[in-house]
């Protein structure tokens, strides 16, 4: 299957600082990228959807000014957690969707563990 | 949105077939059934998907009932590395997108534990 990478794989930051997470589709062009968040022992929750060159669409309850998403190219999306607080500590997973053969398929990155102290 | 119902957990002996059920009784005629799995602290991994017919690939088989209200994911020879949370998802397409615009909504999944 297609490869999606995330960087960093884990990060620790202090409360009040911002942290940026990168998501790259390595071997295909991602027309759409998604950001999910997963708290311990819970399922993945979709945060936002972004199409290349467009503003992201956020799910209900997700603060767009806190979670800044940039999808500047067909292979790169970034999520910036601004003014991070301990409650933002979570596992952030990106996903990229692109044309695979004759259908659009969605692949997931390995996730980024964020710990805010 | 079509919802899915899965048992919270299952056990399977190593080397035996693991059969994971999923109910999706409100599925619509053009909605696909997808299966992903998530090994601890990793991103979800695609397994298989289908619409009406049974499907098989190198990882698993997907059996969809004729009325499409339920399906079963079969891992033919489970190994310890198959221990993971398995998610059954109904893909909800944007009606006019031609399959290019859809959301995957994750439920709680089934924790499959493969025992030695």
Image (cartoon, grey):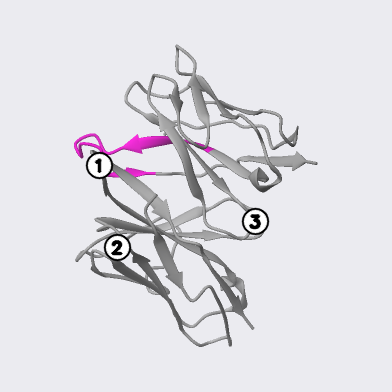
The answer to whether residue B5 is above or below residue B81 is: above
Image-based side of B12 in relation to A40, left or right:
right
Q: Nearer the viewer, residue B19 or A115?
A: B19
Residue A102 part of the magenta segment: no
- Coordinates of residue A13 in the picture (x, y in percent): 57, 85
The answer for how far apart the CA atoms under marks 1 and 3 are is 30 Å
Which residue bears the numbered disc 2?
A56
Look at mark 3 in the image and give the residue it sits on.
B40
Residue carrying label 1: A101
Q: Nearer the viewer, mark 3 or mark 2?
A: 3
Judge whether A21 appears above or below B5 on screen. Answer: below
Q: Do circles 1 and 3 both sit on a common chain?
A: no
- State the SS at label 1: loop
Asked if labels 1 and 2 share a chain, the reply is yes
Whether the residues at callouts 3 and 2 have beta carbons within 8 Å, the answer is no
Q: Nearer the viewer, residue B10 or B48?
A: B48
Task: Using a 10 Å C-alpha cutoff, classify the residue at mark 2 as few (fewer than 14 neighbours), some (14 to 19) or many (20 or more).
Answer: many
Specify few, some or many for label 3: CA neighbours under 10 Å numbering under 14, 14-19, or 20 or more: few
Q: Earlier in the sequence, mark 1 or mark 2?
A: 2
Using the image as rendered, state which of residue B114 and residue A70 is in the foreground: B114
The Cα–Cα distance between marks 3 and 2, rounded to whole angstroms, is 28 Å
Quarter of the rendering occupied by the C terminus of chain A: bottom right
Q: Is residue B102 magenta?
A: yes
User: In which chain is the residue bearing label 1?
Assistant: A
Q: Position of residue A27 (x, y in %)?
A: 30, 60
- Write the start and end of the magenta stretch as one range: B88-103
Dot 3 falls on which chain?
B
Q: Callout 3: helix, strand or loop?
A: loop
Identity of the residue drawn at 42% across and 24% down? B27
Look at discs 1 and 3 and give the one toward the viewer.
1
Secondary element at tag 2: loop
Mark 1: give few (<14), some (14-19) or many (20+) Cα within 10 Å: few
């Amino acid at each position: 299957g297609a490869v999606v990478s995330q960087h960093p794989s884990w990060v620790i930051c202090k409360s009040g600082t911002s942290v940026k997470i990168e998501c790259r589709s390595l071997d295909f062009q991602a027309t759409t990228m998604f950001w999910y968040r997963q708290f311990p022992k819970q399922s993945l929750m979709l945060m936002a959807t972004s199409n290349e060159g467009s503003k992201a669409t956020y799910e209900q309850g997700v603060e767009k000014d806190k979670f800044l998403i940039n999808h500047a190219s067909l292979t790169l999306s970034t999520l910036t957690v601004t003014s991070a607080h301990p409650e933002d500590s979570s596992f952030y997973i990106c996903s990229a969707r692109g044309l695979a053969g004759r259908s659009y398929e969605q692949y997931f990155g390995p996730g980024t563990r964020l710990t805010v102290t | 949105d079509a919802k899915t119902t899965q048992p919270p957990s299952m056990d399977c002996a190593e080397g035996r077939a693991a059969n994971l059920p999923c109910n999706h009784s409100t599925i619509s005629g053009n909605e696909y059934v997808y299966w992903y799995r998530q090994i601890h602290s990793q991103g979800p991994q695609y397994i298989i998907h289908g619409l009406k017919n049974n499907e098989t690939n190198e990882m698993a088989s997907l059996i969809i009932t004729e009325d499409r209200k339920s399906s079963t994911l079969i891992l033919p020879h489970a190994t310890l590395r198959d221990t993971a949370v398995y998610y059954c998802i109904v893909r909800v397409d944007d009606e006019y997108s031609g399959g290019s615009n859809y959301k995957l909504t994750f439920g709680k999944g089934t924790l499959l534990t493969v025992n030695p």
